[in-house]
Image: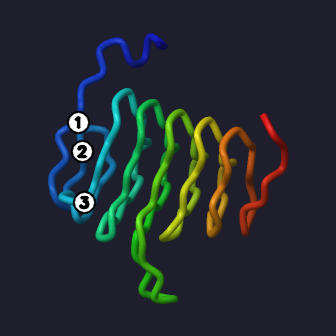
Amino acid sequence: MSRTFKSWKKPLIQEGKFTRWHWVVRHTKNFKLGKNTDIGAFTYINAKNVVEIADEVQIGSHCSIYSVSTIDNKAGKVTLKKNCKIGSHSVIMPRITVGENSVIGAFSFVNKNIPANVVAFGVPVKVIKKL
């Protein structure tokens, strides 16, 4: 375990209010957060239809994670599996799973499931290589 997480404590998450680290969750009752996670400042998480973030996930700053989209009427659970990494300014749409150990590059638009152990990036996201 890295030094960053030696004294990790679950953050106080209140409906629609910034955490100590300046990220926010809507629909907190449907939000599940694993241990040793790192979520960057100004990230917005809409958990209306469940957002589950597993242990040791890292999310860069200014990301948006949506379990509902009013633009195209999609809705569904978002799952970020253990040890995946989401680059800054990325957008994750409803009904998406990012697999264990996968890396999403910065500024990516994630509109399809990403398997475990890959690097993916782009608008829309594409798998670039296996890890």
Residue type at mark 3 is Asn
Q: Are marks 2 and 1 in contact (CB under 8 Å)?
A: yes
Mark 2 or mark 1: which is in front? Answer: 1
- How far apart are the two marked residues, 2 and 1, measured between alpha carbons? 7 Å
**Which labelled disc corresponds to residue 19?**
2
Determine whether the residue tagged by mark 1 lies in a helix, strand or loop. loop
**Which labelled disc corresponds to residue 30?**
3
Q: Quadrant of residue 5?
A: top left
Determine whether the residue tagged by mark 3 lies in a helix, strand or loop. helix
According to the image, label 1 marks what residue?
Answer: 11
The location of residue 35, given as percent across then percent down, is 34, 30
Q: Indicate whether 43 appears above or below 66.
A: above
- How far apart are the two marked residues, 2 and 3, measured between alpha carbons? 17 Å
Q: Is residue 112 left or right of residue 120?
A: left
- The quadrant in which the C terminus is found is top right
> Which residue is drawn at the image coordinates 65% and 66% (left, top)?
112
